Amino acid sequence: MPKQTSLFPDDYDDFFRSLKERIRSTQVKAALAVNRELVLLYWQIGREILQRQQEEGWGAKVIERLARDLRLEFPDIAGFSRTNLLYMRAFAEAYPDESIVHQLGGQIPWKHNCAIIDKVKDPEQRIWYIQKTIENSWSRNVLIHQIDGDLYSRQGGALTNFEQTLPAPQSDLAQSLLKSEYNLEFLNLREKALERDLERALLEHMQKFLLELGVGFAFVGSQYRLEVEGDEFFVDLLFYHLALSCFVVIELKTTDFKPEYSGQINFYVNVIDDKLRRSTDNPTIGIILCRSKKKSIVEYALRGMSQPISVSTYRTTAMLPDEFKAKLPSIEDLQHEIEAVAAIVEEVDRKADSE
């Protein structure tokens, strides 16, 4: 690493001068209003900072001075704070190939990129979240919600029989769109909620539920009535998926998955195919949304079923990491603590009365 005789590198002024010209050029070219140009500029600045830190040993003081000088030179332009310069450096470090910036990073706002840099460390997952943001036009808050909910790990992980019951193009797309677990924490339900409570809560929060289901789901109705030879049957939730061009039946279960659930939803899917499906629609899909499932039981239950069925779970309370769970007191420990505090309070009251 080259030694420096002063606090700032000898070529700092030349670097700052060239940087000013680049910024002015970009202003003339796009007035920093075109997002792609802005993100590309930030990447280029970050790359320069990264290279000079690696090759010339630039330290934190140089970044602070650079931020101050840029703000003085361009007072009408936000984005040149020390924090944002560090984000630029991290952005360039995360995506060393400029083509990624052109193809992906430049397609989403800068604050979205910062959120991904902050929260996602795996390069493959970063690119995946950028692609999903572009596809679904996520706001920054929605993007953060999806990252915090670990959408990457849940997407496409549902247990299904799609490979056996749907043609290849639709089966692959349907599989990729369904999740292994749905995050319904926004419902604030008690642990032993009944199915009607779950359905009522989902209807009250339909917008959030549609967001969690993913793009393309259009709500058709709840307790959708089906009639077969004079008998009435009611589907919990009925949707139509625009990309799959098919009806989607969702049955809500507040228990572990049971084999008989697959027979029930297979029946509903058959009836909807006969009574609602049009010639332009693809086969109806059934989703069983239950509290928990065992992989082998689900696979046995779906084997031989003629209709496309998926089994996923849901959670209604935040999941704590295992290391935190291990540190939480048990119910027995809490009870002992309560009893001990009560005994102390009782003793204090007794002494006060005796005085």
Image (cartoon, rainbow, N blue to C red):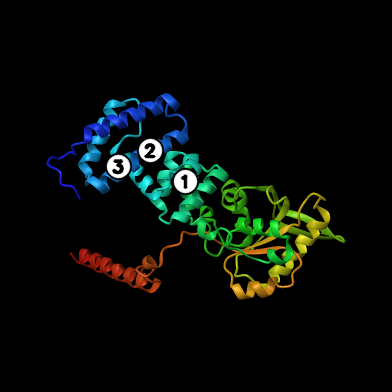
- CB of mark 3 within 8 Å of CB of mark 2? no
Q: Is residue 270 left or right of residue 18?
A: right
Q: Which mark is residue 49?
A: 3
Q: Nearer the viewer, residue 244 or 89?
A: 89
Seen at 51% across and 56% down, the residue is 152
> Can you give x and y, in whole percent of width and height, for residue 164 in the image?
72, 67
Res 193 quadrant in image: bottom right
> Can you give x and y, in whole percent of width and height, for residue 327 in the image?
34, 68
- Write down the residue under mark 2: 42
Seen at 19% across and 39% down, the residue is 9
Mark 3 and mark 2 lie on one chain; the one further toward the N terminus is 2
- CB of mark 3 within 8 Å of CB of mark 1? no
- Write down the residue under mark 1: 100
Q: How many marks?
A: 3
Q: Amino acid at mark 1?
A: Ile
Q: Residues within 10 Å of mark 1 (few under 14, many from 20)?
A: few
Tell me the distance, in whole angstroms, between the alpha carbons under discs 3 and 2: 11 Å
Q: Amino acid at mark 3?
A: Ile
Question: Mark 1 falls on what kind of element?
Answer: helix
> Can you give x and y, in whole percent of width and height, for residue 41 in the image?
39, 36
Tell me the distance, in whole angstroms, between the alpha carbons under discs 2 and 1: 14 Å
Q: Is residue 213 left or right of residue 150?
A: right
Seen at 38% across and 27% down, the residue is 25
Mark 2 and mark 1 lie on one chain; the one further toward the N terminus is 2
Mark 3 and mark 1 lie on one chain; the one further toward the N terminus is 3
Q: Nearer the viewer, residue 330 or 47?
A: 47
Q: In the rendered image of this protein, does residue 218 appear above or below residue 274?
A: above
Question: Mark 2 falls on what kind of element?
Answer: helix
Q: Amino acid at mark 2?
A: Tyr
